[in-house]
Image: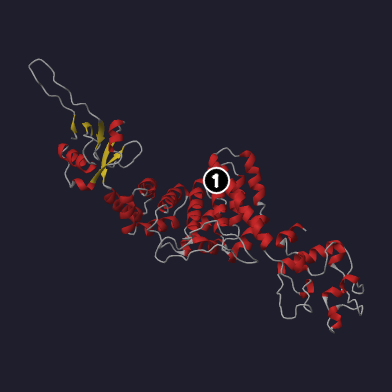
């Protein structure tokens, strides 16, 4: 049983067996006693006996035991270990009461009280009992309002608490797009402290991951637009309602965000580098077809791969090695996507409309601009009078298209002058797609 240390006399002049104290227990009033705790009891029974022996008024259900050093909640699962390690314990409010007290302190908005409460909230929110009570009493709304109004270390504590809360598979589905944009703004500000940016990066990454996809990262490009792997629909009413599209729409409102994230890969704070890598990997893994080209093009423009290459020879932590490998895997997906992305050009650029009168090919403006640049660099002239035997009719000496009274792109010699086998660029790039065009 839980009781203060005492002695039992068995005979005059002779000291009997001593009940050895297993732990020290400190009450909320600061009283510290040495107590012997029976490891066969439940935590609830231990608390009940402590309250009775120490004459503490109040319902024992409103009290709990925590490790005095790490503030870890003592449960039936770790009670024996705490006894064996002779851990110093403290008698505190139960998690459900602590959750209500924390919410009240968040509402006060007093700077000193707020900072202390948020510091503890970082740890307590990981406990199921505390988290459930915190969420049921609208604690998330109060936490979001605090994040929107404070700064410095107080903001860092609040963001860390939110990041820990997002590890729960429930309770935060009410986060709004405007709040997500607030997180984006915090992360995009290069003047924010690193201890603020670390949890903000984690929050954004966890929101990207919360898309309900059954096959994260398995989607591979199969055509000029889209992925082959199916993605499950977002489930209404659950935390798996966010994902890439929701987050990326807010990221686009802060145009410098990706530039700031990539720049942090070259920073000296290893944990910040790691979190930035995990965010980039999450974006690449969850990117949807509607934004895939835009995202990958932006990352290429920012020389992200070059920054990662520098990390490969300078980093010192194992987790970063895994993130670099994940990034390399994502780059393989990017290359495969480019290889399978068809080069779509209009008739002016090589689609023989005369040979394929029933097909219409809308040109890709980006690809046509690249071809225009390649041709201008060649500094050659189009030869519209030359007719090579390869493209003439053996009987009349005229092209098959011209024999039908129609002009054809094959009546000119342009792309063959720089090494293509024909003037039909759509067919020329069938084997290499956009990747071949970029390499050229």
**Which residue does the numbered mark 1 point to in the structure image?**
274
Does residue 388 appear in the picture of this structure? no
Q: Position of residue 165 (x, y in %)?
A: 40, 52
- Asked if residue 100 lies left or right of residue 376, the reply is left
**Towards the viewer: 324 or 24:** 324
Query: Could you tell me which residue is drawn at 15 percent across and 40 percent down?
Result: 52
Label 1: how many Cα within 10 Å (few below 14, some 14–19, many 20+): many
Residue projecting furthest to the bottom: 405
Query: Could you tell me which residue is drawn at 51 percent across and 54 percent down?
Result: 205
Query: Could you tell me which residue is drawn at 64 percent across and 39 percent down?
Result: 313
Q: Position of residue 348 (x, y in %)?
A: 79, 74
Which quadrant of the figure has residue 235? bottom left
Q: Position of residue 292 (x, y in %)?
A: 61, 62
Q: Position of residue 342 (x, y in %)?
A: 69, 66
**Towards the viewer: 316 or 151:** 316
Q: Secondary structure at mark 1?
A: helix
């Amino acid at each position: 049983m839980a009781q203060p240390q005492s002695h039992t006399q068995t005979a005059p002049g002779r000291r009997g067996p001593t009940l050895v104290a297993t732990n020290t227990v400190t009450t909320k009033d600061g009283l510290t006693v040495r107590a012997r705790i029976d490891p066969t009891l439940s935590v609830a029974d231990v608390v009940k006996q402590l309250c009775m022996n120490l004459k503490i008024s109040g319902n024992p259900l409103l009290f709990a035991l925590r490790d005095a050093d790490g503030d870890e909640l003592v449960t039936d699962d770790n009670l024996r270990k705490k006894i064996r390690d002779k851990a110093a314990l403290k008698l505190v409010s139960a998690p459900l009461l602590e959750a209500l007290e924390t919410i009240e302190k968040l509402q006060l908005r007093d700077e000193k009280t707020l900072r202390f409460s948020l510091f503890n909230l970082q740890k307590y929110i990981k406990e199921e009992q505390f988290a459930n009570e915190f969420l049921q009493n609208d604690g998330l709304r109060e936490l979001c309002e605090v994040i929107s109004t404070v700064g410095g270390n107080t903001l860092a504590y609040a963001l860390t608490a939110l990041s820990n809360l997002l590890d729960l598979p429930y309770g935060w589905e009410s986060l709004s797009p405007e709040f997500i944009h607030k997180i984006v703004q915090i992360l995009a500000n290069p003047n924010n402290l690193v201890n603020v940016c670390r949890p903000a990066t984690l929050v954004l990454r966890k929101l990207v991951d919360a898309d309900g996809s059954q096959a994260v990262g398995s989607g591979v490009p199969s055509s000029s637009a889209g992925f082959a792997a199916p993605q499950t629909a977002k489930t209404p009413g659950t935390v798996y309602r966010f994902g890439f599209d929701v987050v990326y729409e807010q990221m686009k409102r802060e145009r410098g965000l990706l530039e700031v994230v990539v720049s942090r890969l070259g920073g000296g704070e290893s944990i910040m580098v790691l979190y930035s890598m995990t965010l980039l990997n999450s974006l690449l893994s969850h990117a949807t077809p509607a934004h895939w080209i835009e995202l990958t093009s932006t990352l290429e423009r920012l020389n992200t791969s070059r920054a990662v290459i520098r990390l490969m020879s300078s980093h010192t932590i194992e987790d970063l090695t895994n993130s670099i490998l994940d990034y390399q895997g994502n780059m393989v997906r990017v290359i495969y996507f480019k290889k399978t992305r068809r080069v779509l050009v209009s008739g002016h650029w090589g689609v023989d409309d005369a040979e394929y009168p029933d097909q219409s090919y809308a040109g890709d403006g980006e690809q046509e601009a690249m071809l225009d640049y390649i041709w201008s660099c060649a500094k050659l002239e189009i030869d519209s009078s030359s007719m090579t035997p390869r493209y003439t009719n053996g009987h009349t000496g005229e092209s098959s298209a011209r024999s039908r009274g129609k002009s054809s792109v094959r009546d000119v010699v342009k792309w063959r002058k720089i090494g293509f086998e024909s003037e039909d660029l759509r067919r020329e790039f069938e084997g290499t797609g956009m990747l071949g065009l970029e390499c050229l």
